Amino acid sequence: MSDPKLDAYWMPFTANRQFKKSPRLITGADGMYFTDDKGRQVLDSIAGLWCVNAGHNRPRIVQAIQNQAAELDFAPPFQMAHPKAFELATRLAAIAPEGLNKVFFTNSGSESVETALKMAIAYHRVRGEGARTRLIGRERGYHGVNFGGISVGGMVANRKMFGSMLGGVDHIRHTHDPARNAFTVGQPAHGAEFAEDLERLIALHDASTIAAVIVEPVAGSTGVLIPPQGYLQRLREICDKHGILLIFDEVITGFGRTGQPFAAQTFGVTPDLMTVAKGLTNGSVPMGAVFAKQGIYDTFMNGPEHLIEFFHGYTYSAHPLACAAALGTLDTYAEDGLLTRATQMQAMFAEALHSLRGEPHVIDVRNIGLVGGIELAGLPGEPAKRAFNIFLDCWDKGVLIRTTGDTIAMSPPLIIEPQHIEHIIATVRAALRRAA
Ligand SMILES: Cc1ncc(COP(=O)(O)O)c(C=O)c1O
């Protein structure tokens, strides 16, 4: 029997009936830990949902939000602005990959993706190549849940229920290649050639119809897929050769996850547009952003000066609370050196993760920075069930993990210490041994 108080809330991306029979309620959080409604401390191995990169309840962020709420609750973002929006954009441009110095604000990763896709199509139109409307995504990609994002995305469950989606979209193949790359530490050696699949689509559709290619530098929601060595470089070269914009969706990789502020810097490949959210405010207030190259912005800045150049935006773009939270977040990241801390922790994290090789059901382990994927053999005929059972077991034992399909995906707060890593891995190891 489920509690009637839990009835009304239709929970997102949740097995509602299972949850309501056996709820997992979080009532507080501090540092590396959640507190649940029974007063238990639960170690957070996933930074909330890849977003609380500085750990929970950070004083500067809390203070910034509280002060802002009392000072300015809202300012219209269309034809108006407030000072912190400019201050934040300037601070973000300063840590962004080279040349990505224009910042457009949204409220989520999904909205950032829609914004970037629209920017790409409109950009080509403004510069006189209006036939470039086609968008290319990648199999197994995740770009949020709005229609543009699920269209360029490549996760079957997120697509199959929702009709025909956007027209004019195609997908390059994914990079997952366990036969050659299983249990690789860091970037896999094999698979740069998967980028050539873009040439196949260009040959099919012609470059003159293609606006942009969007990929996650590290695919997270589809089970932690690390880009093979040379793969992103090759995508960049092919896009350049054909005048196609390259969009990196850095919603999970942004803000220190891979050891540099952005994965573009970790992998040494600069996109034309870059989407972020999550770590931008340390998960505290919803906010996303799109970074654009100067030349893209400049292309829009033509025509009569009193006219709007880009017909797009949200009521809550650059919301004052979100801007204040993001500024407090950037201060926290800077003070604690968090945007590069994953480089110090990644060797130990990788060793701990890869020590699970040989445990029951483990068929691959993947890692980069403070991201880890542990892929399990699924239960025959019941995909995702084995991993879900392990998730429940770990929660029971006081560690929050996350699973996607039959992969355990880890993305701990960047403040993680060795004893937390040991505790997480020991808990997962014991759960694997118990699991059917
Ligand atoms: C790569 C990527 N893009 C977009 C999104 C969507 O972000 P949001 O849930 O904030 O809309 C996510 C969320 O996990 C993501 O991982």
Image (tube, helix red, strand yellow):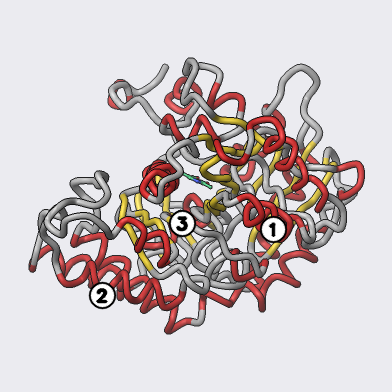
Name the residue furthest left: 71
Front-lying residue, 372 or 139: 139
Residue 38 seen in the figure:
no
Q: Which of marks 2 and 1 is nearer the N terminus?
A: 2
Residue 150 to residue 217: above or below: above
Q: Where is residue 422 in the image (x, y as percent from the top left)?
A: 70, 64
Q: Name the residue under label 3.
A: 51
Front-lying residue, 296 or 14: 296
Could you tell whether 306 is left or right of 319 in the image?
left
Residue 258 seen in the figure:
yes
Given this view, does label 3 or label 2 mark the residue nearer the observer? 2
Could you tell whether 329 is left or right of 201 in the image?
left
Q: Position of residue 12 (x, y in %)?
A: 41, 31
Q: Quadrant of residue 305?
A: bottom left
Name the residue furthest bottom: 335
Q: What element carries label 1?
A: helix
Q: Name the residue under label 2.
A: 87
Q: Distance between the residues labelled 1 and 3?
A: 31 Å
Which amino acid does the dot numbered 2 rest on? Glu
Q: Residue 237 carries which label?
A: 1
Residue 188 to residue 58: above or below: above
Classify mark 3 as within 8 Å of ligand 1 or not, answering yes or no.
Answer: no
Q: Which residue is drawn at 59% across and 42% down?
A: 221
Front-lying residue, 2 or 406: 406
Q: Which residue is drawn at 24% across and 52% down?
A: 309
Which amino acid does the dot numbered 3 rest on? Cys
